[in-house]
Each structure stands twice: as C-alpha cells, then as structure tokens.
Image (tube, helix red, strand yellow):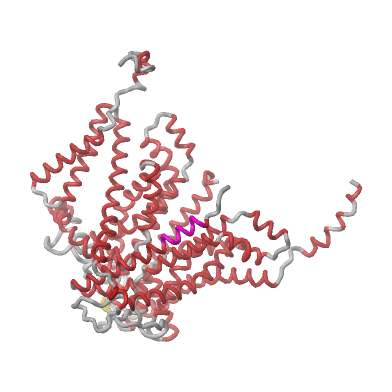
Amino acid sequence: MTTTAPPPTKPEPHRATGPVTRPGDRIFAGMARGSGIALLVVMAAIAAFLTVRAVHAISKDHGNFLTTFEWTPSLNPPVFGIAVLAYGTVVSAIIAMVIAVPIALGIALFITHYAPRRLGGPIAYVIDLLAAVPSIIYGLWGALFLVPHMRGLNLWLDDYLGWTVIFHKEDPNSAARSLFTVGILLAIMVLPIITNVSREVINQVPKMHQEAALALGATRWEVIRLSVLPFARSGIISASMLGLGRALGETMAVATVLSASPTLSAHILDPVGGTFSQNIVAKFGEADDFGRDALIASGLVLFLITLLVNGAARIIIQRRKEYSGANA
Amino acid sequence: MSDTVMDATPAAGRPAHTKLASRHLPRWSPLAIAAGAIVVAVAIGAGAGLSSHIQWGLIALLLFVGGSYAITAQVEGRRQAKDRVATSLVWSSFILAVIPLYSLVETTIKKGAGVIDGTFLTHSMNNVLTLQPGGGVYHAIIGTLEQVGIAAVIATPIGLLTAVYLVEYGKGRLAKWVTFFVDVMTGVPSIVAGLFILSIWFVLLDKAPANGFAGSLALAILMLPVVVRSTEEMLKLVPNELREASLALGVPKWRTIVKVVVPTSIGGITTGVMLAVARIAGESAPIALLVFGSNVINTDPFHDPQSSLPYYIYEQYKNGNEPSYARAWGAALVLIAFVMILNLVARAIARWKAPKHQ
C-alpha cells in the first residue's frame, strides 16, 4: 500500500517509447505485406494484360464479338465471336450442376447421417482423394470409356424424350461426343469438391438442433429437412457455386470428349458446339499471333464469368460466417 | 412367449400405447423390396428387349423407391414412408457416384499396368512413330518435375509470407482484400492462367513463349492461393499463449514468427504445400499454351519446348490410334500414382505432426 506513489512515475518512460520496433521487425513485416500486395497485383495484372490483348483483337473483328457463331480469325477480314462458346459453356455447366448438386448433397448426407459411423470417415477420405485426380485423366476416361457407353442411354433418350427437342438426336448413329456427355463428365469431376464443402458445412450444424427435433418425434428425414438443410443451405449453395466455377473453366476433359463445330443447337445430344476453354486449346496450335489474341479475348470473357461466380460464392460464405453464432 | 416379454404385455390393448408401438415393417423389408424390384426390372428389361443394363438399373431403382413408399405408407404411415424414400435416395446417390469414380480408377489401372515397364519409364518418344508401340514417358517425367519444382519454388515463399501477413499482421482493408482475392484466385481456370502468361510474353517480348519456365509461372499462379489458404488455416491453429510467451521474453515479433509460430505448424504447412504441388502436377492446359510439348528429352526449362506428363497424355490421345492410347493410359497411371503418393504422404505428415489435444 505504501508503494502506490512511486509506480506511476516508473512505467511512464516505458509507455512513452511505445512498442519496440526493431529493423528486423520492419523488414519482415514489409516482406509479408509485400507478398500480400504482390498477390493483388497479380490478379490486377491478369485482368489488365488480358484486356490489352483482347481489345487489340476485338477492335479488328469484322463480326460481332458477342453474337457471331464462327471462329475464323485467320480470314481476311477476321470474323470471330463467342456465341457458340458461351452457349456451350453455360449449357454443359448447367447439365453438370443439375446432375451433380443433388447427388453430391446425397453423398454428403450419406457420410454425415446415413452411413455406419465406421464407414463415414474412410468414405470422406476417399472422396477427398478423388478430388485430386487430374482433369486430363477424367478426359481420357471420358473419351475412351464413357463416350462408347453413353450410346445406349442416348438412343433411349432420343426414342422416348426426343419430342422435347432438347433430347432430339439429329443422327442416331453419331458418336456421343456431345454437350450432354460433357455435362455428365463435368458432373463426375465436380462431385468431390461439392461433396467435401457441403459435408463440412453439414458437420457444423449444431447437434442440439438435431437432437431437439428427434426428441419431438421427427423421423430422420424430418430432422434433415427441418434442422440440417435450413442451417446448411447457404453453405451448400456456395459449395455448388464453387463446383460451377470449376465446371465453367474445365479445359482438357471437354477438349478430349467434345467434337466441336460452330453450330448453336438446342439438341444437347448432337455432337456439336464448343466451350471457351475447349476452343482455346483446340485452336491454339494452328493460330497465328492475331489468332492467339482472339483466343485471349475469349479467355477474358471466361475469366470474368468465373470471377463473378466465385466472388458471389465467397460473399455468400462470408455472410454466413458473420451471422451464424453456431460456429463458436 | 408371454412370460419372456416383460414390459410389453401389460401395455397391450391400451389405446394410449398403440400409437407408440404402431406397426413396423420387419428389418429385412428393404432388402426384400430391393430383391423384388430387381427381379421385376430384369423381367421388364428382358421382356421389352432393352439392351443397356443402365436402363435395367434405373427401372429397378424406380420400382424400389416407389414400392418401398407404397408398402411403408400402407403399414407405417406417410411420414415413415417419406423417410424411407429419403433414405433410399441418399443411398442410391452414393452408389450412383461410386460407379463412375470406381470405373475411372479401375480402367486406368487395368489399361495402364500392362504398358508400364522399365523401357516405358526410361525412354523418350524420340524417333518413335506414333503408330508403333514402344517409346516412353521419361522426357515427360523430367518436364513435369522441373516445371512443378520451379513453380513450387516461386509460389511457396510468397504464399507463406502472404499467409503470415494475413494471420499475424493483417488488419484493416488491405487484409480483407487479400483474403477475398485469395479465394477468388482459387477459382481462376488454369487455361486463363496460361493465357495471362502468354499475354505477358506478347506485351513484353512480342513473341510467344515455348519453354518450361513460362509454364512454371502459370502453375505458380494456380498454386499460390492453395498454399496461402492452407498455411493460413494452420497458422490460426497455433495457440496464442505460445506467441505471448515468446513476446514476453522480449523476443522480437519476427523472430517469434520464424522460431515459434512457423515451426509449431510446420507439419500442416508442409501438407498444404504438397497438396498444392499435387494439384498443379496434373494441370495440362497452361502447358499446352506455353510449353508446347516435345518428343525428346530437354532438361533445360528455360529454352525450347518441354513435355510434361498431363500434356503427354493429351498428345497421345490426340494421335488417335491404339499404341498411342496405350501410352496415354500408361502415362495416366504414372501421373495418378505420383499425385496419389504425394496426397497420401502429405496427409500422413498432417496426421503425424498434428497438434495433440491433451
């Protein structure tokens, strides 16, 4: 008690100097901050460099860049447009999503709620590993195994659902190198990533909510519908959008399977059409310098689309993090 | 009978308990319904002359779901019936997904294993006609190792430092932007990364690149966000008490990070880097645009085209004949083995070095 008087004078000089910063600290902090800034610079540079070359190409395009079907930048005057590519990219991605999202959700629920406890862990591990299989191997398998096996299903769809126009097949004997097959292959490819993210979200659903529902006499499905899915909905949406981003940008699997042509067709079983990335890989080899600029222009459009999809997915996830107190 | 069941006998006949002890289907009923569905589906399939077995399977699935709903609704009520349908849908979605994924792995192993031998692993495609069997992947393995190695050398330090910035220093708007763009960068398609490097070469050097180094740069862009994200997660796991203890001893912040924080989480960081390497080792799109591929051994990543395993598979597939397909499957098996070994080792390290909770 008697020593209360001196202390106020003692800490003051310490406080006045503030936290000690040494040169090492400043250098290290600068390097760390610099790396973060470098990453932003790279993203900005991607947009800037692609835009520079794309503007150069589009300014010389004698067709409408957005509505032209053909991709013939080597003609004089050059004519090229992204209509077929944008259509093919979107349609194949939609097919992939329609197939993959329900199944991925099913697997996620299977692992978390239905599988025997002892099986759930190993299954999740294997699905994790499958996410690492390179896309070119999916492409090789798709082209040499899936395409021949799709024949029966294609004919059946044509026979019974041909009247819907969508499933009409112009030439029943043509190979199944169509947007439909591409969509199925993409669905198989994005399945692991959607499953993994959904599973993590579903695992975070508070046990209390589920036990409360069970205690009220709910069946297992009612527990899932009433307490699991509402909580995990935004997480599942963003998982699907991450998968969508991957499906939109997938290159090699599409390039190996699709037999491309500049035709915009509503018949998804016909072997026609194209996607952004498939077109880039397929046309790159024979393209001259201007042709490559044209391909860069189409790449810029793809970049912007994936940027939008991924950005939206991340914003949904972040919002969820802020509002859900259950994570704590 | 009646003396073995202790508590059921007094309750029998009371109206209040009949609801709780309502009628149940026996436990084997799903199996019985499934067997019935399969038998009927086979009969329909064979009768209607449907050639594809996928259709038989789909008919069986529909019959099973419909049948179990109808029977359960009769015996147990509609709520239970819905529950059964949901259960069978979840199970069938799992089985539906396992079939293609299993087929992929099985096909690759079956077709690839016959191709791989000593010659395949130690020879290039130099002077091998695409139509004849023989040749190998040696040049592609060298290309992959060099390109991925350079990419890792570029991306790992930047990624680590960025993660350190986000966890240890990052506050305010810059950190928020970096976090957001790391996430967005994860979704940049590999072909766009390739086009970006291509446009840099066009703008700065006015010509297209054709060497392994340009490919490495594109791979580094794809690797960077994966490294940042995983390292960040690992650094966040380091308990604050460790940092505080070190700072309280008068250790500068940067030495605390280098000597305490990073060593504590080094296992997880290594895992993250290895998973990122495994991811970029399978990328072929940027290689197609920037490195061009080659049939001969080129150990110099800075001059002249190189090959790489994923691009080699694509090239062989494009040749479109049986010997080339065989080589493609062989290379696919080599690549899948490489990626899987990296994955398994990385996960083993993570498990081995994981911080122990008491």
Magenta residue span? B343-352
Whether A73 is drawn above or below B167: the answer is below
Whether A190 is drawn above or below B45: the answer is below
| Picture quadrant where residue A313 is located | bottom left
Q: Residue at x 80, y 61 (%)?
A: A14
Whether A51 is drawn above or below A115: the answer is below
**Residue A32 or residue A233, whichever sits in front:** A32
Relative placement, left or right, of B261 versus A259 is right
Does residue B305 show up magenta in the picture?
no
Could you tell me residue B50's position as x and y percent?
11, 49
| Magenta residues, dominant SS class | helix
| Picture quadrant where residue A220 is located | top left
Residue A326 in view, yes or no: yes
Could you tell me residue B188's position as x and y percent?
41, 66
**Residue A105 or residue B107, whichever sits in front:** B107
Could you tell me residue B189's position as x and y percent?
38, 67
Residue B172 in view, yes or no: no
